[in-house]
Amino acid sequence: MMPLFANRWSIALPPIWLVGTGALIALAVMLLVWAVLRVVQPRAAAEARSSLGDGFAGPFGWLLLTLSAVAIAFTPLVPLNQIGRSLARLSSADRFEQRLSVPAGATLEEFELNLRPQEIEALEFDAAQPLIVRTQQPIEGFALAKQADIEIVPGTIWKWKRGDETNKPNPFIGQKARIEISNAGAAPVDLTVRARLVPENPQVGILPWTVITILGISLAYALFRLIPRRTAAVASATTKEAIGQPVFAVALILGAVMLLAFIVIPYNTFGEDVKMLKDSGLTLIKVLALLVVVWTASVAVADEIEGRTALTVLSKPLTRWQFVLGKFVGLVLVALLVFLVLGTILMATTSLKVVYDAREGGKLDPVWRDCADEMITVVPGLVLSLLETILLAAVSLAVSTRLGMVPNLIICFTVYALGHLVPLIVQSSVGKFAIVRFVGQLFATILPVLEHFTIEAAVVGGVPVPWSYLGWAALYSALYSAVALLVALVLFQDRDLA
C-alpha cells in the first residue's frame, strides 16, 4: 500500500477522482471548442457564453467546476500509476503473442514475458514438442511453487482463463510474468505464448464514460438552443424560474445533508449498510426531484394562466404547442439538474460508506476498486429514477393546465403511489367480480407502470442491469410522456386564457 494511502479514508477517493477528472477533461474540451468558435464564428461563441445565464448551463458549469476542483485536490492521494496503466490498456490492443526459443536440453531456462499478470484474462501455451513449463518460481525463500509444473503436449494447447481458478490456479503471482522452461529433447523448440489482456482495474472506465456523458448532455443542450429557438426560450424561462424558487435550493441542501448523513447512520444490517444507503439515497433523490418538478409545473403553468402571464407570452409569435413543449423541456432540465447534483453526491457517499462500513464492522480494509464497484451500481438506478421523474413531469404538466398547485401535488403523488402498485392491483383482481376486474384493467391502462423504473433490489444486490432494459425503460417513458403531453396540449388548447 502506498504511503499516501496510510489514511484509510483515502481509499474511497480514486472513484470520486475519476468522476472529477472526467468533468475536468469535458470542461477543457468545451473551453477549447469555445475558443475555436471565438476565432471562426464569434457570433456563435457569444451565443454560447450568453447561454450560461439561461438557467441550466450556469448551474451545470458550476457543477463541472466543483468536480474539477475536487479532482485537482485529490490528485496527490490517488494511485496514478495503477489508474494510468489501466487507462492505457483500455485504448490499447488486447491481444498478446510472444514466441520463445528453448534450447535443446535446457533445464529451467528462465524467460521474462512482456506481460503484467494482473492484466491476463486468458492464457495459452502451444509447442510442437514436449516441454515442461514452470510459471511460479519460489519467492523470498519459499521452496514450493503455488502451481504444479505444466506439461506441454504436442498438438494440445494448454489453456487458462480467469474464473477457472478452481481447476487451474492463476499461473502467475507477483508483478512480473516469468516462466522457466525445461526441454528434454535433442533439438530446440519454439513455445508460443498467447494471452488476452484486460485492464488491471476496469473500474477506470468511469472516467471516459463521465466525459462522454457530460459532452453528450452539453451537445444535446446546444442543439436544442440552436434549432427550436422559441421552444428553447420558454424552456430557459421555466428553468430559471424553477431555480429561483426556494423549494429548489431547499431540495438540494436537504438532499445533500441527508446523503452525507447516511454515511454515519447505523442501519443495523449486519454489514449491509452500503446497500441500505444506495436504496435510501435513490428514493430520496427521486422524491425530492419529483417535488421540485411538480412545484415548478404548478408555478410555471397554472400560476401563469391564472395571472394572465401566459396570455402575454402567447401574444408573441409563439404557438400553444411550443409553449407546452417548452415548459416540459424546462421541467426535464430542472429534474436533470437535481439528479446531476444529488446523484454525484450519492456516488461519492457510496464510495465513502464502503470504507466507513469496513471500519465500523471490523472488516479488512477494502481497496479502491471495491469502492468503485459499489459506486458504479448506483448509476442505472439514477438513470431509471430520472426517467420516472420525466414521465411524472409530463403528467404534472397536463394536470397544471387545468388545476392549481395543491390538486397537482395530490394527483401526482397519488399517481406515483398507485403507479407502483399497478402490478399488484392487476394480480389481485384476477378471478374477482367483473367490476373488480374492470377497475383493475382500467388502472393498468390509464396509470403508468412505475415498477418498470424500480430496480432498487438489483442495485442493492449488485446485479448488473443490462443496457437493453435501460433502453426499453427509456422508450416506455418517452411514449407515456408523449401521450401525457398530447393530453396537456388538448387541455391547454381549449383553455380560455383571458
Image (cartoon, rainbow, N blue to C red):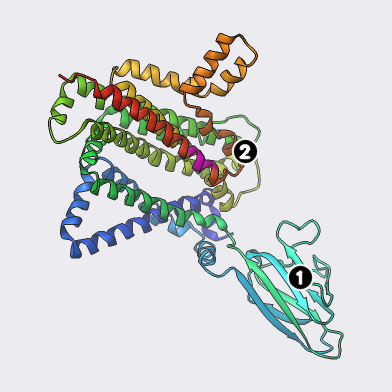
User: What's the CA distance linking mark 2 and mark 1?
Assistant: 36 Å
**Label 1: how many Cα within 10 Å (few below 14, some 14–19, many 20+):** many
Q: Given this view, does label 2 or label 1 mark the residue nearer the observer? A: 2
Secondary structure state at the residue bearing disc 2:
helix
Report x, y in % for residue 157: 78, 72
Q: Is residue 129 left or right of residue 75?
A: right
Q: Residue sitting at 27 percent across and 31 percent down? A: 324
Q: What stretch is highlighted in magenta?
A: 469-473
Image quarter of the C terminus: top left
**Which residue does the numbered mark 1 point to in the structure image?**
136
Q: Which of 266 and 249 is in front in this view?
A: 249
Q: Is-magenta flag for residue 472?
A: yes
**Which residue does the numbered mark 2 point to in the structure image?**
461
Q: Is residue 446 above or below residue 114?
A: above
> Mark 2 vs mark 1: which is more N-terminal?
1
Does residue 92 show up? yes
> What amino acid is at disc 1?
Gln
Numbered label tally: 2
Report x, y in % for residue 187: 82, 90
Q: In this view, does 231 lie above or below 403?
A: below
Image quarter of the N terminus: bottom right
Q: Residue sitting at 26 percent across and 45 percent down? A: 58
Q: Is-magenta flag for residue 189?
A: no
Report x, y in % for residue 61: 30, 48
Q: In this view, does 15 lie to the left or right of 306?
A: right
Q: Dominant secondary structure of the magenta stretch?
A: helix
- As drawn, the label of residue 55 is none
Q: Is residue 237 above or below residue 118?
A: above
**Label 2: how many Cα within 10 Å (few below 14, some 14–19, many 20+):** few
Q: In this view, does 95 lie to the left or right of 485?
A: right
